[in-house]
Image (cartoon, grey):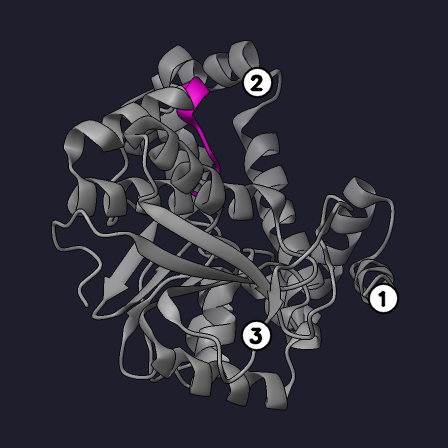
Amino acid sequence: MDIYAPSTEKLAVTLLVLPDSSMMSLASALDTMRAANRIANRELFEWKIATLNGAPARLTCDLTIEPDTRLDDDSRGDVLIVVASFNQQHHAGPAHLKLIKRVSRNFSALGGIEAGSWILARSGLLERRAATTHWEDLEEFATRFPGIEIRPDRFVIDGRVFTTGGASPTFDFMLYLIRRRYGYPLAIEVSSVFIYDGGRSATDTQPLVSLGMLEGNEPRVAAAIHVMEKHIDDTLSIAQVAAQVDLSVRMLEYLFRQTLDMSPAAYYRRLRLQTGRRMVVDTRLRLQEIAIRTGFNSLSSFSRLFKSYYQQSPGECRKQSQSLV
């Protein structure tokens, strides 16, 4: 079955939810289906929530999701969607990955939401396919799975498999699915229910910083931040940033202070440190490598500024995050 072909038939969806998943990512899939059913006044989607062991899944917001079923070899339907976020490697072991790979044959389409892409990749289901994951993990994902064509897109569809970068890209994907299968008018109505006017396409790049409001209020500052995003490891001077957005250094300084109450240099440093902290917490990269990837001249320089900003060293931050797993 091609789930994107125009149809009036119902889709049977199983959402496999791992502990430490994001409520927003799950809701972006669930609530769009619910809204489509309500607006159409008939069941276009039926769904059930599954977990790997049949036990409730505690989400990152500390709410617990009660599953309808346990994923097993008898699980089947039209679409299997794996929802995961943090600590996916701890929640899905080798036996679970083998089960997911076997069960995937019982579904016409297969999806990975956020770190669900990691689960599919670890199960061998993305080999020689194009895929995406949350932008924080794209580089590590590419290193870990060289046989996968990694794209920074909001969502990627490759044959029967789709992957999304997180909550908002999942919403975009669900609207795309509704539009292709059940028609543009329904997709517009579903979007309107949530007052969502993002209008994002699959190939829009995931932003390092979400600048929607800032782009409307001060597009010149937003443009400068986009330049900084692209040059985290090969840091530019503020003069080079200003030149790329056709501003003088003085004007750029003025706009940043008026809009963000800090200098461009301070914001750039903060952006690099935030990127570094995500790598410290979410990857196993050596601290020296993280320092290089965030544009610092040395580990000592990175560590000194990191501790000044976060009140703990990178090593202490990593140890603390691991103790919370």
Residue at the image point whose x is 53% and y is 63% from the top: 115
Mark 2, residues whose alpha carbon is within 10 Å: few (<14), some, or many (≥20)?
A: few
The amino acid marked with disc number 2 is: Leu
Quadrant (top left, top right, bottom left, bottom right) of the C terminus: bottom right
Image quadrant in which you'd find residue 104: bottom left
List the residue tagged with mark 1: 319
C-alpha gap between disc 2 and disc 1? 32 Å
Where's the N terminus, which quadrant?
Answer: bottom left
**295 w.r.t. 265: above or below:** below
Q: Nearer the viewer, mark 2 or mark 3?
A: 3
Indicate whether 257 appears above or below 294: above
> Which amino acid is tagged 1?
Lys
Tell me the kind of residue under disc 3: Leu
- Does the magenta-highlighted stretch encompass residue 208? yes
Residue 20 percent across, percent down from the top left? 69, 58
Query: Which residue is label 3 attached to?
Result: 71
Q: Is residue 108 above or below residue 3?
A: below
Q: Report whether 201 appears left or right of 135.
A: left
Please tell me in which quadrant of the rendered image residue 58 appears. bottom right
- Tell me whether the residue at label 2 lies in contact with that at label 1, contact meaning CB atoms closer than 8 angstroms: no
Give the distance between the C-alpha atoms of the residues marked 1 and 3, in whole angstroms. 33 Å
Q: What's the magenta region? A: 206-214
As helix, strand or loop, the secondary structure at mark 1 comes to helix
- Disc 3 residue crowd, few under 14, some 14–19, many 20+, Cα 10 Å: many
Q: Main secondary structure of the magenta part?
A: loop
Residue 175 rendering spot, x and y as whole percentages? 29, 39
The numbered mark at residue 260 is: 2
Residue 194 visible to the viewer: yes
Q: Could you say which is closer to the camera, residue 90 or residue 53?
A: 53
Categorize mark 1 by other alpha carbons within 10 Å: few (<14), some (14-19), many (20+): few
Q: Nearer the viewer, mark 1 or mark 3?
A: 3
